[in-house]
Amino acid sequence: MAKHETPLLDQLESGPWPSFVSDLKQEAESRTKNEKGVNFQIPVDVCEDLLGVMELSFKHGRTHWKHGGIVGVFGYGGGVIGRYCDQPQMFPGVAHFHTMRVNQPAGKFYTTEYLKQICDLWEFRGSGITNMHGSTGDIILLGTTTPQLEEIFWTLTHDMNQDLGGSGSNLRTPSDCVGQARCEWACYDTQALCHHLTLEYQDELHRPAFPYKFKFKFDGCPNCCVASIARADISFVGTWRDNIRIDQEAVKAYVGGELPPNGGSHAGRDWGPFDIQKEVIGLCPTSCMWMEGDELKIDDRECTRCMHCINVMPRALRVGEDRGCSMLVGAKAPILDGAQMGSLLVPFIKVEEPYDEIKEVIESIWDYWMEEGKNRERLGELMKRQGFQKLLEMTNIKPVPQHVQEPRHNPYIFWKEEEVEGGFDRDVNEFRKHHLR
Amino acid sequence: MAFISSGYNPDKPMENRITDIGPRKYDEFYPPVIKNNKGKWLYHEILEPGVLVHVSETGDEVYSIRVGGARLMSVSHIREICEIADKHCDGYLRFTTRNNIEFMVDSKDKIEPLKKDLAARKFDGGSFKFPIGGTGAGVTNIIHTQGWIHCHTPATDASGPVKATMDVLFDDFQNMRLPAQLRVSLACCLNMCGAVHCSDIAILGYHRKPPMLDHEYLDKMCEIPLAIAACPTAAIKPAKVELADGTKVNSVAVNEPRCMFCGNCYTMCPAMPLADDVGDGIVIMAGGKVSNRITAPKFSKVVVAFLPNNAPRWPETTDCIKKIVEAYAAGANKYERVGEWAERIGWERFFEKCELEFTHHLIDDFRDPAYYTWRQTTQFKF
């Protein structure tokens, strides 16, 4: 018999998509039965009460969680988010229900051995409820009490060689796409760079010293599977600057219908026979491709590397060999001054250990933002407030036409005194000798 | 429930403390076929919805079976995932950025038993535990935020609307009939932990009533200058307020017509709650993308200003999304994303095809970018 009636939530158990309600109930039941004899360190009915408070929110149309208090582990300013229920008498099992962010491995590959360790720890010292994963990328452990925080941290660091992730005004846990581990399009090793920078900047990740949050995300190619361009303060998007590699035999096989276009991703509908002219050449945004007889030609100098042709004919076309990444900066969600997409700062940079050139750019951006950024001002907002020119100046990057979609629409240039011959200091009396008052 | 120590000594917190070690190294977790072929992959193909093969220059192949999952997941469920991976995949698996799980096997004959196993597992309530799909020109898993399960500022739930929406779009999770991939995302307030602002279809929680002012407690619970500074439209100013019992307290006043309901004040000051059962609800946005393919990444545009929080299944929201998906499926060219389709046919046509009403709420009036969204040409469609 369930502790709380949940008639509204129960309606989310039907339908084909995996039901989180069924899963919460399964965990509630597992705790009640406790067949393994776990010595639960937080209330055994935590999942029952979580269902109860959720049902109440479904009834009220409002959340029943309060602002977090200051909780955490000693010496860190992030990684734990305090959470308290606003109806603790009704739901004592979730009265204190803090979140811990556990830094996921780059690429999100796991062994079951590791995941089982996480499960054992979180069943023992927490609610047994997780997010796999949070939006930023962490493994999210949802719901424990304050006395458990240090214990969990101890077990993670001592027994699992595992650290917490970021929260608050610090470097948030970096995340990446599957990259070269299982993708032929990745132009650099996203996992290596993500992991390296995560370790390099542990202090920035754990001890908030920034004006606001700061995110790194690593996409191996311009398809942007981790959406770095839309949400990272610095996004690292793989690219190349030589030629797309062409296998003309495979081109013929696509044209001849022997290979499915777009890796078979359109198989659910009959789109008719593949038409390379219409589907590839005609859709190329720079019109830099053409057929000569049965050979595909590309004017690579005009290519903007949008990936379309490569996506459509993965067996015929491959990314170039002189690879690296573009760095775009300042992306963010709408809070506060509207959403921003990342703006191109470094058109091309090699991605090679020990990544010194990349770190130089990162650190010059941080120096600027920490000096000039206001409280709770994201990098993108600072860039809007002070201008892209200022960012170029502070990062010592030379302006190039690649930095803009188009040149400015107005002539209101803030000329600096040193840019104008003779400076700004003039003698008005000298002027008046030729121009009467 | 006796307290059991991990080894941590609260009297000497620095004793044997380990910090700043970061995450586990990624390559500890690579299955052998990944470890041996990293950086050597030649091409991939989707063999059927949810099943991919990647082929390496070494001749090796890895077959990935992708299954959807609620990102809210219990340890019992994760243990079941592990059991499957132990049985079929030598104890390895991975998660995708969109909360899918990928089971990888290194030969073709291992696919069918794995698929059969996955498809047979259901929750007691009847839903699939591990639906196979989420690849190619279809709908993949919804990325989302916490909502009412764990967050203090949401204007809608997350897990509930996601479950309801994925039930409605389930066929397109397991099929690849759409013109291109279609990404749905949900953020339960405009803090957008989920960064949904560049999705083909975004479900966004939004408040519509200004904050209530808990005058008696405001100065005790909050730093008033921080609350004032938090407001992006400068709608909050300091105020002296006389309580019912005659005591005068320091508080704030809100210029209500200037409020854009962002909730930033509440983030800084818990004595200014916005949540409301009828005020809160969902904004539907459409036409965004993050890929650079063919056209540049795009922001999603607001196409429905408000839909109510009609728990537990949000029928107004799922109906609206279904209409957009069907209109897109019927009208877009092969490879065209929702936003590219809308731009080609024109937004006036988009509203007609999707049977959505255009209202004044959909005309941007927020600062400079607004101007760039008005029509500055005589080219339009009747």
Image (cartoon, coloured by chain):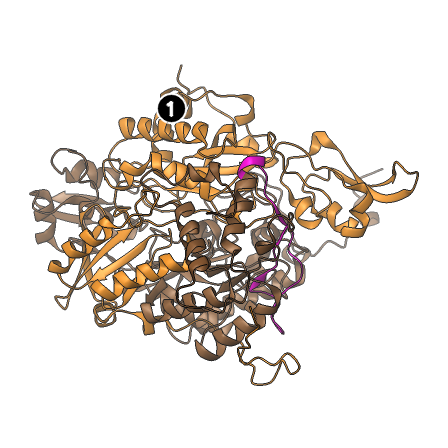
Chain colours: A brown, B orange
Left or right relative to B106: residue A75:
right
Which residue is painted at 18% across and 43% down in the image? A290
Q: Which residue is the extreme one toward the front? A: A1
Residue carrying label 1: B354
Q: Main secondary structure of the magenta part?
A: loop
Locate the C terminus of chain A and report the quarter of the image it occupies. top right
Q: Position of residue A279 (x, y in %)?
A: 20, 38
**Residue A135 shows in this picture:** yes
Magenta range: A58-85
Classify 10 Å Cα crowding around label 1: few (below 14), some (14-19), many (20 and above).
some
Q: Nearest the camera: A233 or B264? A: B264
Left or right side of B288 for A152: right
Most distant residue in the top direction: B382
Q: In screen coordinates, is B48 left or right of A304?
A: left
Q: Is residue A81 magenta?
A: yes
Q: Is residue A335 above or below residue B353?
A: below
Task: Reply yes or no: does residue A41 show up in magenta.
Answer: no
Instruction: Tell me where residue B152 appears, x and y as whole percent.
Output: 60, 48
For badge 1, the amino acid type reads: Cys
